[in-house]
Image (spheres, helix red, strand yellow):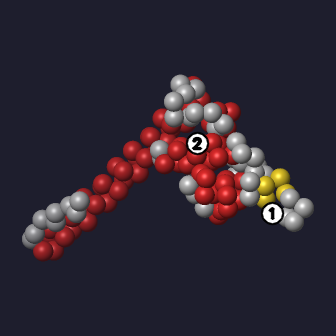
Amino acid sequence: MRIGELAEAAGTTPRALRHYERAGLISSERAPNGYRVYDERAVVRVRNIRHLLAAGLTLEDVRAFTPCLDGDVAAAPPSGRGLEVALERLAVLDRRIAAQTAIRDRLAAALLRATGERVRPVA
C-alpha cells in the first residue's frame, strides 16, 4: 500500500509516517516510480506506535517496544524493558510537572503582591 493509504488506514498523516520511517520504526520498499510501498502489516505497527506516543512515550522510548510493535501492544503483558522505559518517562513527566507548578506558583505569588488579588487557576 502507498503512504497515503497507510496514513488513512492507521489514522495518521504521511508526514508522521515519514518521521517514523526516519526513526527506524517502520520500513518501506520503493516502487519503480519511486513511491513508498508498505506491507499491509504496517497498519498494526503504526497504530501501536501512535498508541505508545499517546501514552506519553517519545519515539526514542518506542524503540524499546520494537519487538512487539506488530502484535497487540495494548493487551500484551509488558516486558521488563517496557516497564523500565515507562517508569523512566513517568519520572521525567513528574519532574516537568513539578517544575511547571513551581513556576506557576511563583508567578501567582508575584501577581498577588502586585495586585493584592489571588489568581484563580484556569481549568
The residue pinned by badge 2 equals: 48
Total numbered badges shown on the rendered structure: 2
The residue pinned by badge 1 equals: 35
97 relative to 14, above or below:
above
Q: Position of residue 9 (x, y in %)?
A: 61, 53
Residue that sits furthest to the bottom in the current view:
115
Q: Which of 54 and 3 is in front in this view?
A: 3
Quadrant, the N terminus: bottom right
99 relative to 83, above or below:
below
Quadrant, the C terminus: bottom left
Q: Which of 67 and 28 is in front in this view?
A: 28
Tell whether 109 sits left or right of 6. Answer: left
Which class describes the residues within 10 Å of circle 2: few (<14), some (14-19), or many (20+)? many
Which class describes the residues within 10 Å of circle 1: few (<14), some (14-19), or many (20+)? few
Q: What residue type is labelled 1?
A: Tyr
Q: Position of residue 104 (x, y in %)?
A: 28, 60
Q: Which residue is drawn at 20% across and 61% down?
A: 121
Q: Residue at x 9, y 71 (%)?
A: 116
The local secondary structure at tag 1 comes to loop
Residue that sits furthest to the left in the current view:
116
- Foreground tag (1 vs 2): 1
